[in-house]
Image (cartoon, grey):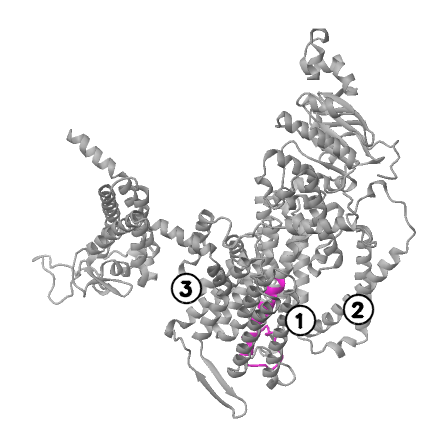
Amino acid sequence: MTGQTSGTPVLQATNVTKRFGGLVAVSDLDLTIMPNQIASVIGPNGAGKTTFFNCVSGFYTPEEGEIRFLGHPIQGLRPDQVTARGIARTYQNIHLFQGMTVLENVMVGVHPGLRSTPMGALLRLPLNNIEEEATLAHAYALLDFVGLADFADVLATNLAYGSQRRLEIARALASNPRLLLLDEPTAGMNPQETEDTMRFIRRLRDERDLTVLLIEHDMRVVMGISDQVTVLDYGRKISEGTPDYVQRDPLVIEAYLGTAAEEVDVNLLAT
Amino acid sequence: MLQTRIRQFVASLRTGIISGLIVGLIVNFLILLGIPVNLSNIALLAILLVALVFGVRLARRLRAYGLGHLLRNALAMGLAAALLVLLFMALINRWQERNVKVTDYFYSVTPQTMTVLSGVPASELFANPPRDPLTGAYPEGKPLRTNPMRLTFDSETGLELVDINLVIGGFYGFLIVLILAGVLGTLLAWVFTVARLGQTWKRARAYLATSPQAHIGVLLLPLAFFALLWLTVGHGTYRAATGSYSTINPILNLGGSAQEVQLLIGFAIILFGLVAVRAARPTDSGLSYRARLALCLGIVAVMMGLGLWRIVGSRTYFLATSKALGGSETISVVLTLVVGALLAVQNILRLRTPGRFETQFAGTGAILAVLLMPLYLNQGQNDVMTIVGINVMLGLGLNIVVGYAGLLDLGYVAFFALGAYSYAFLSSNQMEAGADGQPASLKFAGNDEMVVKLAGWVPITVIVTLVVVYLGIRLWRRRPPAERRPWEHQRPLVSYSGRPGGNMTALITVTAILLSALVASLLEGTGLYDRLFASTSPFLVGIIIGTIVAGLSGIALGIPVLRLRGDYLAIVTLGFGEIIRLLFTNLRDYTGGPQGVLEIPRPLPEGATGGVGYLSMVYLVLIGVGVIAFFSLRLKQSRTGRAWSAMKSDEDIAQSMGIHLVQSKLTAFAIGAAFAGIGGVLFAARQRNIYPSDFRLDVSIEVLSLVIIGGMGSVPGVIMGAVALIGVPEVLRQLETYRIMVFGAVLVAMVILRPEGLLPAPVVQLRERARALTHSHYRQEGGEA
């Protein structure tokens, strides 16, 4: 909560281009996110949203362009280095660790913040013992925060779908990130669950001082909680701004619906 | 009309006929395997058991139909099976009649096969002498063949079923017995279902699972089996004062099979020790601190008493001193008392925390039973225990690589070999023949000097490293407060009075190593080592060096295979295992080649003789197993262990959680390899001669099998796996011919029936502890969320 000049963008991507052979997945993308914002990236399927996320979190290295996190470049770093810097991420398809309980899954997320070594584990060094207890407490507190404390000893794969999503978020929060990337957090949820998730994301921003970047298809969520919306189509940014502005942008409407602007009821996007 | 009726009739027997054909094929398969030849006393039983089991299976499948239908199908099954077996054995008989050599076609089918299946002795199963071409009669006086294809009903020619004479003989008699076995199985299963015995069985099981008496019984099992062992062993009474020695006969005399049964009881002690500790619940059973203490200390006292009586009375010493060899008794007694005192203290301290009574009780009982067990077994049995123990160590090491970290390593035997050869090179007294054929110098020249040199280097390295690390951290803490990089805000979960990060630690470590090398080589020149370490046992040095060498080679293997997954990793590691073995075979000048390394001394002082040898070996192995098991359990519940579990489940996602894959994989390889190295050193000490052929791929596969069958990722499981796959075959020597086949069959059976293993790792229950820690954390921080 301190020492962060509000002028430095948390994430600043400039001219990011990612090609897979002949296919250009992301082309010349500029994106800036200021601290404590909820930013959304939307666009039709295949627009390059998840590819951009993968570039940020280190799975891909962009061919051109730069991605800066808190002013320092992170393109080309390994995924574990990116996470150690303070960016955490969830996934479109839930990837929880099998064979481990809910609590253990969150405890894995704490990994970057620890300094215990295997030798310390063998010799029971005090650092290891202190960190073990702190890890347990921290993980349990996070489960409490997302409401899964009662399921702490259940195998992660035995949870219901909505609970698994919340567990993924708890695991991502375990490393105390500054920036949280959420890939379609409300996929497969009914309207009530979607409402709960929206409130939860707002809580994350307010109570935990996080910056959140979302990929979403559900327009209610996007328009409801975003401070800034970026629209991608075929890898290019076609619009950016506040939700209201983007809703009315004819380019966006054409991209989503494929027809000329006048013929379409503008309010369709606002449902 | 008749056609339809016949067709319907045959259709109703389909299940039976198909089952019968399968039974016939299986029986023929068993015959081809040579079961009647190699296991002649139980061959008939095995074959009839097959028919029985399929009869039971038939009954379960045709449960819905009536008894008549069931019996018809059972009969059809028997007839179909009999038909297939008849066809095959008729061929064999015809060949034997015509003097055709059957073993040219079916390797394991000899006249003994026909003997077992028909009761006709092998000496009468030859071809008939040639007939006279004119009269067509057999020549006078020549013995004629007895045709086994007959049916007789007297006890002289009857079939022998495990010492019971069936009074029915001839091959047709065997077929009738086969059919009857199938029908019997069906009837038994039918009776079982009809009498609803299944319900009674379920009720009994439920009762055993929940009743408190059964629970107490489970906790006492290791002690019960130890008592059983104690009853079956002869005891000695040696009175030092008069020098007289007499033996007391065992209270429970087992006769000829004592060897095997005692060994099996020993295995049961291990198994139920693990089961008891697993079954212990976190309660105190309503006992006061004094009562709990009394019970646990009581066990310690009783077992200690028994142990001391054994040591003194039967003169089973397990440790020899180099000073006064007659002091073996004293030192054994002292060591026993020390162990007893340690256990007592541990119990006193631990029982203070509530809820630990059952674990302590079961654990103390199990540990004492296992520790005292070797004192009551003889050399051969202890030898088996040693081999099982070494395999447990290998299994636990592989458990870390495969079970915890999910890296399929098929070349694990390489580290085992490296550990063994390290100790061999250091300590072998193998003489090399000189030009005149007489024994000249030591083949591995300079190994005594090497031992002394290494014995000096190791403590120097430790001392210097500690000093450098301490000074390094002190200096680092004095550095001017550097500007924190923005992303280091809130980074470490726990701020523990300043420890340097990765790069600085690496720098300090490298400096420490270089400096210690410098200091050690300087000191070496002064001849200090020769004075201090001249009489160091090569075994101690060997253990340390073997572990280090194996660990480093684990890292060396890990580096090229970092990017490989699954099958590719398996093949490459397999190659590595073979490379090491071939290196040892072909570098004759350095490693002795296929002739191996001989004359490796036992880890005992010079001149120690007698029984101490094998007992000290067993205890060394037990200590090794204990240490490795303890380390494995510690690693599992640590940051490293969780990183391994995550990596095993999904490498990419683990990486995105901040886990450095290279570090994790190399650590897993290194630690697993180091454990194999320890096992290798102990193996060389036990075998005393090692050859490259001891380290073939088979060993890797065996160790992998015992990890899988015991339960991947579970320490008690691996111990059980080793006992089941290595220990039990030692007892059932008869199965030696079929060892590999039984291995495979057990693997397949386990994968189908119990894929998680014999004693799978339980799901970790950390919630209570986490909750308690969270609340105490919050109280400290004043309720901040």
Amino acid identity at mark 1: Leu
Q: Farthest right residue?
A: B480
Label 2 vs label 3, nearer the camera: 3
B458 left or right of B60 in image:
right
Q: Are marks 2 and 1 in contact (CB under 8 Å)?
A: no
The residue lying toward the viewer, choosing from B426 and B430, is B426
- Mark-to-mark CA distance, 3 and 1: 35 Å
Q: Earlier in the sequence, mark 3 or mark 1?
A: 1
Q: Tag 2's secondary structure?
A: helix
- Mark-to-mark CA distance, 2 and 3: 52 Å
Label 2 vs label 1, nearer the camera: 1
Q: Which residue is mark 1?
A: B540
Q: Which residue is mark 2?
A: B520
Q: Chain of mark 3?
A: B
The numbered disc on residue B732 is 3
Q: Give coordinates of residue A126: x percent, y percent.
A: 75, 58
